[in-house]
Structure formats: structure tokens, C-alpha cells
Image: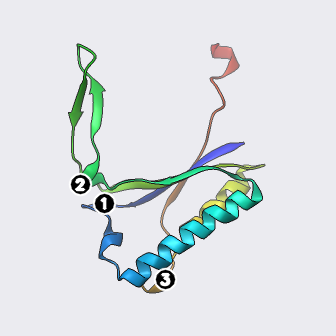
Amino acid sequence: MKYILMMNTPGNGPYQVANWPQQDIKAHIAFMMGFAKKLKGTGELVAAEGLAGPDQAKRVRAGADGKPITDGVFPESKEFLAGYWMIEVENPERAYAIAAEASAAPGPGGKPLNMAIEVRQVMSGPPPELM
């Protein structure tokens, strides 16, 4: 079963991480790189990426002519998606355990962030009754 783990972080402008002491940023990045390496080693990692901050985001929709219409930037968002992992595991409990581990990534002073990680199953296709 595939799951996407979405790492949400408080909004109100660019990444708050940018204001951390450099040693704390390095420790956080080292944790994330080690975490991805660990998941690759177990064969559970499908993909993982960090995302640019909301100060660089655009909302796009098609106009009447099909051309893109953009809106944003949205730095005032309450929270934003900072990154994700897509994993493939045997059951939802394993997905929750991985999410909890990611949630405890180190923050300022090395204290665990305990950030919110949203876990959602990736559907392999539409329900058969709708095809």
C-alpha cells in the first residue's frame, strides 16, 4: 500500500527554518537526509522532496482560452506543505510509525519539532465500480 506523508509547517511568510541558527539547520537537514536513506534501505521509499516556501507559490487555473491564469503569492497562509515522502508499506500502522519518526525531526536547539505529518493512502486507481 502506498501512502503520502505530507509535512506541514506554520505559515506567515518564508520558512521559519531560515531564522534558525545555522548549526540547527544543518542538523535538521542531516536528519532528513538520513531518514530518506534509511527508508531507501528498507525499500519503503518511493519518492521524497522538500518544497519551496509559500512566498514562491502560485495557484494556477486554466482561463477560458486554456492559458494559465496565476494567482498568489500566499505568504500569509496559516500553514503550508513543506515537503513529502511517498512510501510503500505493508499497512497503515507502518505508515503512521514512519510519520511519527519524521515528525520528531530536530528543530532549534535540537529539540524535536513534533510537526504535523498528514498521512494519506495513495489510490492505485479509481474504484472499479466507477470504471
Q: Nearer the viewer, residue 63 or 126?
A: 63
Q: CA distance from mark 3 to mark 1?
A: 20 Å
**Marks 1 and 2 close (CB-CB < 8 Å):** yes
Q: Residues within 10 Å of mark 3 (few under 14, many from 20)?
A: few
Which of marks 3 and 2 precedes in the sequence? 2
Which label sits on residue 111?
A: 3
Quick one: which residue is furthest to the bottom in this view? 109
Residue drawn 36% across the image and 54% down it: 52
Dot 2: what SS? loop
Q: CA distance from mark 2 to mark 3?
A: 26 Å
Which of marks 1 and 3 precedes in the sequence? 1
**Residue type, mark 3 in image:** Lys
Dot 3: what SS? loop
Q: Residues within 10 Å of mark 1 (few under 14, many from 20)?
A: many
Which of marks 2 and 1 precedes in the sequence? 1
**Residue type, mark 1 in image:** Gly
**Marks 2 and 3 close (CB-CB < 8 Å):** no
Q: Residue 35 appears in which quarter of the rendering?
A: bottom right
* Residue at numbered disc 1: 11
